[in-house]
Amino acid sequence: MRRRTYEGETDVGLLQAFNAAAIAATGGCGYVHPGDIPHRLFNGNKLFEPAEVMTVWEDRVGVAAWVLVGPRHRSYDAQVRPDMRGGVFEREVLEYADTRTAELMRLHGIESNQMLGDAFRCDLTRIGLLAEMGWESDGEPPYVINRARIADLAPPMIPDGYSIRPVAGVEEAAAVADLHSAAFPGAGWTPELYRQVMESPGYDPGRELVAEAADGELAAFAVTWYDNLNRTGLLEAVGTHRDHQQRGLGKAVVRFAARHMADAGMEFVIVANEGSNAASEALYRSAGFKPWHLLDGYVKAIG
């Protein structure tokens, strides 16, 4: 078994193929969508070097596991190949992830006395290992992965005065960064940081859809990702500019994005919301999504 850090763009496709195959074998229980890998690596970890936060294990078969630490989020993703689940190896991967997360938090001055984690409610193997390792339930509502068959979704109803289109390219980095910041205050986006995302492996401006007002201001967005093996698209992230909310733009962009995915061969679409986010939950229910998988949160003391 070889353990190594992220080595470059080729790894993104390698790990996406790994997760797509794992999802096909398990029905998605315990595995993140392939699109979550570049999203979390280059967007969620935009302030960190990929080799610092991503670790990969390989054996004679291929990728055996990977861990992506999110120091700012005080958490990590740990994905283990289905045939390697539930034994000594998975525990070693999780123990490494615990240690590496605490290490990077200290290194970057992120003060907290605990780490945050989660597990699919259907993944009894991971839940059992977390309990053995001292993780405890956080008592919060579960994180919800919602799913819909695209053919079952109603056509988008775009509000008067708006149109929806793909992002043109990196020349719109400043405008898109402003849109993301207006949708998620405190996210810390700058034109330079979002340009880095747009130039990172896996991202395609043609798969980021934006609603544009008549005056040219960008008003809402949905970034789409594809899992061609399982014919399932992912919406991550989705947001509406604070000055354009309560106009039906969120639902319009989500449904438009789903049709865009169908044109690329997707049959299903998934999107997630935190259990405590009533607004997001209402949006996705009204758009035609239903809960598919639930993830419960866990906490563990550091030190």
Image (cartoon, grey):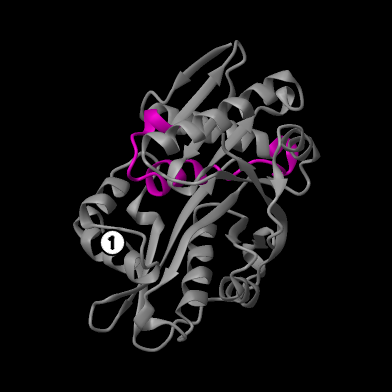
- Residue 226's x, y, as percent? 51, 48
Instruction: Please give the range of residues in magenta.
Output: 24-53
The amino acid type of the residue labelled 1 equals Ala
Q: Is residue 85 magenta?
A: no
- Residue 53's x, y, as percent? 43, 33
Q: Is residue 2 left or right of residue 186?
A: right
Q: Is residue 41 magenta?
A: yes
Vertical arrangement, residue 106 with respect to residue 236, above or below: above
Query: Toward the viewer: 73 or 42?
Result: 73
Vertical arrangement, residue 111 with respect to residue 53, above or below: below
Q: Which residue is found at the position 48% from the left and 26% from the top? A: 55
Q: Give residue 152's quadrant in the image.
A: bottom right
Q: Which residue is found at the position 55% from the left and 20% from the top? A: 57
* Residue 64 visible at all: yes
Vertical arrangement, residue 10 with respect to residue 30, above or below: above
Considering the image in quadrants, where does the N terminus appear? top right
- Residue 82's x, y, as percent? 71, 29
- Residue 71's x, y, as percent? 45, 41
- Are there few (<14), some (14-19), or many (20+) residues within 10 Å of tag 1? many
Q: Which residue is found at the position 29% from the left and 63% from the top? A: 176
Q: Is residue 90 left or right of residue 220?
A: right
Q: Of helix, strand and loop, which one carries label 1?
A: helix
Residue occupying the far bottom of the picture: 160
Pointer 1 residue: 177
